[in-house]
Amino acid sequence: MAASTAPLLIKRYASRRLYNTQTSDYVTLEDIAGFIRDGREVKIIDLKSGDDLTRQYLLQIIAEHESRGESVLPLDVLTDLVRSYTTNAQSVVPQFLAASFEMLREGQSKLMENMAAIPNPMASMPGFDALQRQQQMFLKAMMGGWRGGASGPEREDGTPAPPAGSAAPEDERDIAEIRRQLAELQKRVSKL
């Protein structure tokens, strides 16, 4: 593999400290989460045993974000995941989840490409550029955290928006409606 596509190797020492072999310094879980948000693949291994600990640390990162109120996984999804470990569905769930996330990534990139490629007579309207930037920021915010996506929603002034878990019930319904509309739009775009 080329150096740019090779996973970033992180070694865990006996002291449980994590060492970035590329930059020769110690890193935290939040640093590793940042690498992933920036589109890097990471591989975390135990220095002594050579065991691959990547899954364990990624789950820990997810658990920490969820516990801080940065909820991405709805309670019913978490419940279904727990159930999948105790049923025969365990063999199907990983492939289903992988395929679902791949479709989201592809849909996001196709949608962004098509938005940029479609000539629009409204482009000559005053303020159209600002509107288009807002749409792109909205899409990045909706897909934030995915590879190549934004790290999270931001306000117009560039400051981080409140975590999704802090939304009022009406806001949650609005977000669900926006997500439904976005899914419909992705289906339409994929047919183009």
Image: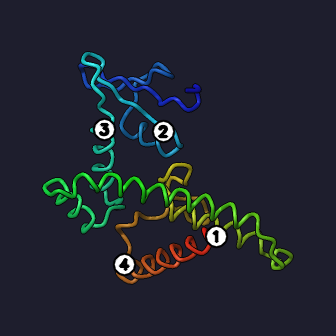
Residue drawn at (40%, 81%), measured in percent from left and top? 173
Verify CB contact (< 8 Å) between mark 1 and mark 2: no
Foreground mark, 4 or 2?
2
- Tag 4: residue type? Ala
- Tag 1: residue type? Gln
The answer for how far apart the CA atoms under marks 1 and 2 are is 26 Å
Numbered circle sitting on residue 108: none
The answer for how far apart the CA atoms under marks 3 and 1 are is 34 Å
The answer for how far apart the CA atoms under marks 2 and 3 are is 13 Å
Q: Which residue is mark 4?
A: 168
- Tag 2: residue type? Phe
Of the numbered discs 2 and 3, the one sitting upstream in the chain is 2
The answer for how far apart the CA atoms under marks 4 and 3 are is 31 Å
Q: Which residue is mark 3?
A: 57
Q: How many residues crowd mark 2 within 10 Å: few (<14), some (14–19), many (20+)? A: some
The answer for how far apart the CA atoms under marks 4 and 2 are is 31 Å
